[in-house]
Amino acid sequence: MPPTLSFQLQNIQQRRDGTSLSELIVQGLLSTPLKLPSLLLWDDDGLRLFDALTQTPTYYLHDKEVEILAQYANDMAARIPSGSVLIELGCGSLRKTGAILSALERKNKAIDYYALDVSPGELSDSLATLTARLGPSSGVKVHGLVGTYEDCISWLAGNPWPQKQVDLVTLLWMGNSVANHGQLEASSVLGQFARAVQGAGVPCQFLVAVDACQKESRVLEAYDSDQEALREFILNGLRHANTIMGRQMFNSDEWDCVCRFDAHDHTLRVYYTCRMDTELTVDGHRLSLANGSQIEAITSGKWTVGDVQQIAKRAGLRVKDRWCDAECIYCETTICPTLLFDTNRGRLLYNDCRLSLL
């Protein structure tokens, strides 16, 4: 058996005075409409349950992305220069990541790859599987980052490579996970990442997977709330909420989930829904919920080409390359700044999405 690659996990979680997850739970349950933070879905159990969901026959997103990577991974790797950094945001199981890293290896590129996730246990297991699958490598160096998107933005803004020349930072978002944000929020997050990297005088780009399917029946078949895999994944969020709050706030027997597709804003919305009249005690308030009441759990955008262009434009970015599946309902997209000026060195790094050789 070939030796596995060694890697280290770096905890980049910030100690901040901001809102805690328990406070977000309270705020969401006292808001109108009701919602719970989607971060509740991504504990260790949630990551495993979501991975099981992606392997179900109707979950087309996984198969479409595998199809694109099988055909175009070499083209994507060609956009990532040697001597650069690749950071995968919300990496999950890393099952598909190996296609891009293997393509980089074949091109003999020296790359520092960082996998970011909130769960150290699942991240360590996923990286162990990934490095074993890649085998011995002299080019791609594998690292793990434990934290949220917000933590990663702060980490990048602190210039984590002060003694190293980094030619480019590529931020990788696979599995349509960028679309768990609303379109305005996605623009904000993209902009924050870009500014954090550029503030260190390093050029950046994004490689983003986007589900563009607009056929309601197909979307709802992939997210079938009668399917055990989806129900287990979503309802685990309530179990996690109970753990965070330190008490049995939600009785699992009283809850189910339901999915609805909003064709107007190209978004799937997933809700926790009451199976009977129930009451919740929230920060001293008694909240009465009738049978069928809904609490938003998570959203998943199904963005058109125009949607992605507008999201990028609001962030001061633009779409450059697109690689699509045969049906053109899923794509991998490169997004980059239209202009980047390195104030530290007084040079233009990007102009019209092309790397300067200055």
Image (spheres, helix red, strand yellow):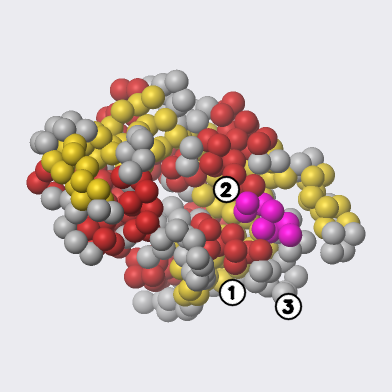
- Residue nearest the viewer, comparing 201 with 61: 201
Q: Which residue is mark 1?
A: 138
Give SS at disc 2: helix
Q: Nearer the viewer, mark 1 or mark 3?
A: 3
The correct choice, above or below, for 166 with respect to 335 in the image is below
Label 2, label 3: how many angstroms apart (C-alpha)? 27 Å
Residue bearing mark 3: 163
Residue toward you, 287 or 144: 287
Magenta residue check for 14: no
Q: Secondary structure at mark 1?
A: loop
Q: Is residue 166 left or right of residue 275?
A: right
Pick the residue in front: 31 or 112.
Answer: 31
Question: Which residues are the magenta region?
Answer: 192-199
- Where residue 171 appears, as percent x and y from the top left, is 59, 54
Q: What is the crowding at mark 2: few (fewer than 14 residues within 10 Å), some, or many (at least 20)?
A: some
Q: Quadrant of the N terminus?
A: bottom left
Q: Position of residue 192 (x, y in %)?
A: 63, 51
Residue 322 found in image quarter: top right
In the picture provided, is 328 more to the left or to the right than 50?
A: right
Query: Which residue type carries mark 1?
Result: Ser
- Report crowding for label 3: few under 14, some 14 to 19, many 20 or more residues within 10 A (C-alpha): few
Q: Quadrant of the C terminus?
A: bottom right
Amino acid at pointer 2: Val
Q: Residue at horizontal 66%, vertical 69%?
A: 158
Please tell me how crowded label 1 is: few (under 14), some (14-19), or many (20+) other residues with Cα within 10 Å. few
Residue at 22% from the left image edge and 42% from the top image edge: 287
Please identify the residue farthest to the front as the structure is shown. 284
Does any portion of residue 200 appear in the rendered image?
A: yes
